[in-house]
Amino acid sequence: MKRTIALLVAVAFVVTLAGMVFGRTMEEERDAVRSYLKVIDAKIVKYRKAGNTATVKKLQGEKAATLRRWEKLKAEMEGSMIAPPPPPVAPVPPPPSVISPMGGAPTGLLGMGWNTSISAGYIMGKSTMVGRADLVLSDLLGIGSMLGMGEKAVSWRVGLGGASGNDINDKSIKAIPVFFDGILNLPADMMGGIESYVGAGVNYTVYGTDKKTGTYGVQAFVGVQGDMGLGGKSFAEVGYSAIRAGDINKRSAKGISVSVGQQILL
């Protein structure tokens, strides 16, 4: 009988050890211990009824040792369990914004991310002052990428302005033209590290001298830009402009033009 009990204890120990070696889960180990304790308890009841006190005490000792081993094993398994890291949170993409050739972060005074610019200029010849406010758009057609110059190489400028001065006949003119320009940003190393660009466009006077619409005009320019600490890049341009406030041959202001401006992010 003693050999049988010893054999059962040895088998239980081997089963427990095998479970540790082959990496059983805590639930599996717990179930195995419970099953073994049920066997021990059944034998204790059996031998207690038979009056075999020595065997009962031995079985109770084995039960207590098994419980101690289980508590130790449980503590070791709980200590070795490392909670897996939480899954990474996908970054929220920023809202789309208009990209200006002048640069700037998409925040803005009004939080809209719109790149705009204001400028004031002068058409020589018969002295005409020109001011304009523009919305600067990114390269919607992907022309810069097609030219192999990058997606920010080309931008567009659309705006409204005002002109006041003298026409080619030295007569007073006033005009409210709309402007549309295409801008090509040049590599910085072309100007020794200075940001520069060239551009050209058309304008149309929606309301001019004699309360009439004008006709189409043109402008072409080269410019430089840089951050002067005014909240956006400042720029200066020189080129040729023609604004027609009425008759193409009589009510036009044209000649060499110069202008300065400031980028503003709304």
Image (tube, rainbow, N blue to C red):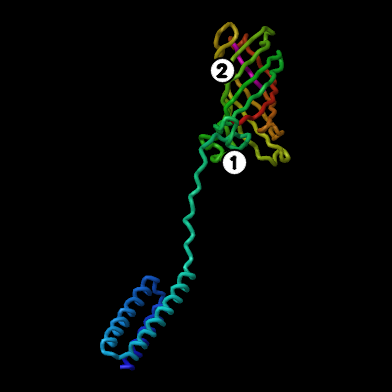
Pick the quarter of the image with the N terminus: bottom left
Q: Quadrant of residue 136?
A: top right
Q: Is residue 196 left or right of residue 57?
A: right
Pick the quarter of the image with the C terminus: top right
Circle 1 residue: 149
Circle 2 residue: 204
Above or below 10: residue 206: above
Above or below 147: residue 137: above
**Span highlighted in magenta in the image:** 240-245
Q: Position of residue 81 (x, y in %)?
A: 47, 68
Q: Position of residue 90 (x, y in %)?
A: 48, 49
Q: Look at 59% across and 41% down and name the residue there.
A: 149
Q: Amino acid at mark 1?
A: Met
Q: Secondary structure at mark 2?
A: strand
Task: Kindly give the residue lying farthest to the right in the view shown.
Answer: 192
Count of labels shown?
A: 2
Residue 143 or residue 265, whichever sits in front: 265
Q: Is residue 93 left or right of residue 201?
A: left
